[in-house]
Image (cartoon, grey):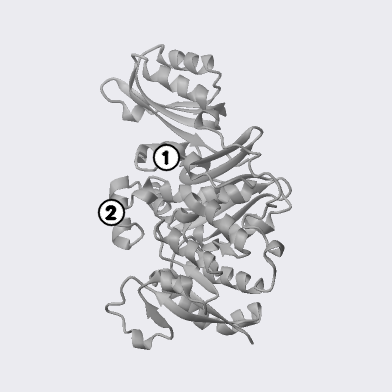
Amino acid sequence: MKTVAIGIIGYGTVGQGVVEVLARNAREIERRSGYQLQVKRVAKRSWQGIDTSTLPFACDTDPFAIARDPDIGIVIELAGGEHPAFEIIKTALEHDKHVITANKALIARHGDALFALAREKGLELTFEAAVAGGIPVIKILREGMSGNEVKRVAGIINGTSNYILSEMTQKGRDFADVLKEAQALGYAEADPSFDINGTDAAHKITILASLAFGIPLQFDSVHIEGIDALTPDDIQDAAELGYSIKHLGLAVRRDNGVEIRVHPTLVPQDALIASVNGVMNAVQIQGNAIGNSLYYGPGAGKLPTASAVVADLIDVVRELNLKGEDRLAEFGYSQVLDRNTLPVLPPEDFNSAYYLRLTVADRAGVLADITRILADNGISINSVSQKNRHKHNGHIPLVLLTEKVREAEMNAACAQLAALPAVSGAVKRIRVENFE
């Protein structure tokens, strides 16, 4: 049986998981791939505190040495970050090595340039582990859904934010308290900003949008909102209306383009995605042939992520004897066709229903003023409720659900509502997705 030599860049949690999965499932992997897969060299910034004499591979501190090694056929990049990961992958491709990465930020921001180099060299650059950990959602979109025109991808794709919202929903806790607990449990980093402000999810939905619609990677066009402004009152209001609040990444096909957005979202409590709690991930895909399908599982962790990396590794090994032009394109779309047929829409062209929460003076005529402003902007009201139990200094919260509306009209209406003398403070608004 032939042997393929592998180099790994990064020996943290996932790197160790890849080595473990390759050893634990060696026989099954050989049966599936037809090759023996041997980890030859691993690079780590420092090996201090690790007994390297017990490891079955050469231990390096220079990742570029692995990227240039003529005896290594496949490089697995698990170091993370944009730089020097970009330069490492570029060097590996230039030295005729297939590359596997779990680096969502790198793919979202620099993927098109690296994919172009891989195609020019007739090499594979795969990235299954970059989104949703152990859920094979990239393969699903690229291959399993290829008979569909994908209409929408909606994902809970950041476990930290999902854990925080689950705790706030189930136990009525405040955001700050749950965040501290998530950090203590290791679900959130010491600096959790990328998770709670939506950047991590935006990297991932950028990739999923390109897979779903065959468009270039366009991270800078993603509309991003975090979860730090949500309060227990918002979550309670949503529950009373029959909704849960989830932090979603959404890619939606419209007649005139594509919406790519990350934000807190009211979803019906009976929708499957509403039941995804804790640190778990889920991605719901709507195709014009299959309808709605949901894919659920761990979005991070040592072995789930390693499983996705090894699945990519097996795919690459299976295709070693194929010419570059015979291999499946990175996003599953022919490179001959134009990938710019669907523009990414600006936020003012988004189309969504809304939850609105206003603090208003408790006097006659206020509701009439509010409904008039909404009507003048072409916004229909689905429901209205007063939160009399929260009356304070003659003011009460007023909660409205609207029908779908273009965001430009909602922006204008909210500005006019905030200017009413009877309205105190800002108008809180959260988008609503009904998953019909």
User: Which badge, 2 or 1, comes first in the chain's sequence?
Assistant: 2
Relative to 229, residue 36 above or below: below
- Residue 306: give x, y in percent of width and height: 49, 70
**Can residue 23 be spotted in the picture?**
yes
The residue that appears at 61% across and 51% down in the rendered structure is: 211
Q: Could you tell me which residue is drawn at 30 percent across and 56 percent down?
A: 181
Mark 2 and mark 1: Cα distance apart in space: 20 Å
Q: Quadrant of residue 311?
A: bottom right
Q: Which amino acid is tagged 1? A: Glu
Where is residue 203 shown, x and y percent of the image? Answer: 47, 50
Q: Is residue 26 above or below residue 385?
A: below
- Residue furthest top as drawn: 365
Q: Quadrant of the C terminus?
A: top right
Q: Position of residue 65 (x, y in %)?
A: 42, 73
The residue carrying mark 2 is 180
Looking at the picture, tell me which residue is in the foreground, 287 or 127.
Answer: 127
Q: Look at the picture and state if 335 lies above or below 72.
A: above
Up-down relation of residue 191 to residue 220 (above or below): below
Q: Secondary structure at mark 2?
A: helix
Give the farthest residue toward the left: 393
**Residue type beneath disc 2:** Lys
Q: Is residue 231 left or right of residue 322?
A: left
Left or right, residue 179 beside residue 166 = left
Tell me if I can see residue 156 in this picture: no
Q: Residues within 10 Å of mark 2 (few under 14, many from 20)?
A: some
- How packed mark 1 is, by other alpha carbons closer than 10 Å (few <14, some 14-19, many 20 or more), is some
Residue 129 placement, left or right of 188: right
Q: Mark 1 falls on what kind of element?
A: loop
Which quadrant does the N terminus fall into? bottom right
Q: Which residue is mark 1?
A: 225
Q: Nearer the viewer, residue 180 or 15?
A: 15
User: Nearest the camera: 11 or 25?
Assistant: 11
